[in-house]
Image (cartoon, grey):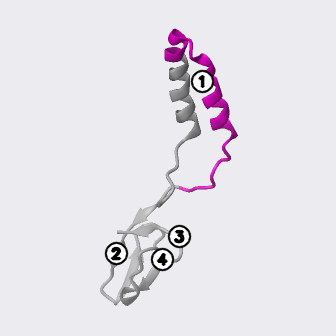
């Protein structure tokens, strides 16, 4: 299963909204505990996925739409070997 990544600040915003709701029911302690546990989780080192496509040229080559690297048409890869863009 592929891991899913979220932005910590957005998750904390949800918990802070829960603080407001929980406070009306006397459950503020649980929201505070959830916020503390979320802050204890180490952050992941992730980068956004860059999408590109191979642009076919008439001379038997193709070019990455992201970094402009030339490659042979017969070597169409799912990722650019130069910039790592995911090809569609």
Residue marked by disc 4:
69
> How dense is the environment of label 2, judged by Cα within 10 Å: few (below 14), some, or many (20 and up)?
some
Which labelled disc corresponds to residue 55? 2
Q: Residue 86 at what x, y percent from top left?
A: 43, 68
Disc 3 element:
loop
Which residue is pictured at 65% across the width and 35% down the height? 37
Q: Tell me the distance, in whole angstroms, between the alpha carbons under discs 1 and 3.
A: 45 Å
* Marks 2 and 4, the one that precedes in the sequence: 2
Q: Which residues are magenta?
A: 20-47
User: Residue at horizontal 52%, vertical 34%?
Assistant: 10
Nearer the observer, disc 1 or disc 2? 1
What residue is shown at x 51% (from left), y 77% (from top)? 81
Secondary structure of the residue carrying numbered label 4: loop
Label 3 vs label 4: CA separation?
8 Å
Nearest to the observer: residue 22 or residue 16: 22
In the figure, 35 relative to 72: above or below? above
Q: Nearer the viewer, mark 3 or mark 4?
A: 3
The label shown at residue 49 is none
Instruction: Return the x and y of residue 13 as percentages of the image width and height.
Output: 53, 28
Left or right side of 3 for 43: right
| Front position in the image: 54 or 14 | 14
Whichever of labels 1 and 4 marks the residue nearer the N terminus, that label is 1
| Residue that badge 1 annotates | 30
Dot 1: element: helix
Q: CA distance from mark 2 to mark 4?
A: 10 Å
Q: Are marks 2 and 4 in contact (CB under 8 Å)?
A: no
User: Is residue 46 a member of the stretch shown in magenta?
Assistant: yes
């Amino acid at each position: 299963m592929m891991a899913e990544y979220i932005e910590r600040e957005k998750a904390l915003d949800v918990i802070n909204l829960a603080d407001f709701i929980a406070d009306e029911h006397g459950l503020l302690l649980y929201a505070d505990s959830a916020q503390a546990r979320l802050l204890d989780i180490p952050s992941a080192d992730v980068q956004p996925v860059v999408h590109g496509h191979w642009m076919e040229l008439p001379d038997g080559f193709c070019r990455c739409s992201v970094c402009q690297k030339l490659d042979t048409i017969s070597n169409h890869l799912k990722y650019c070997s130069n910039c790592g863009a995911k090809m569609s």
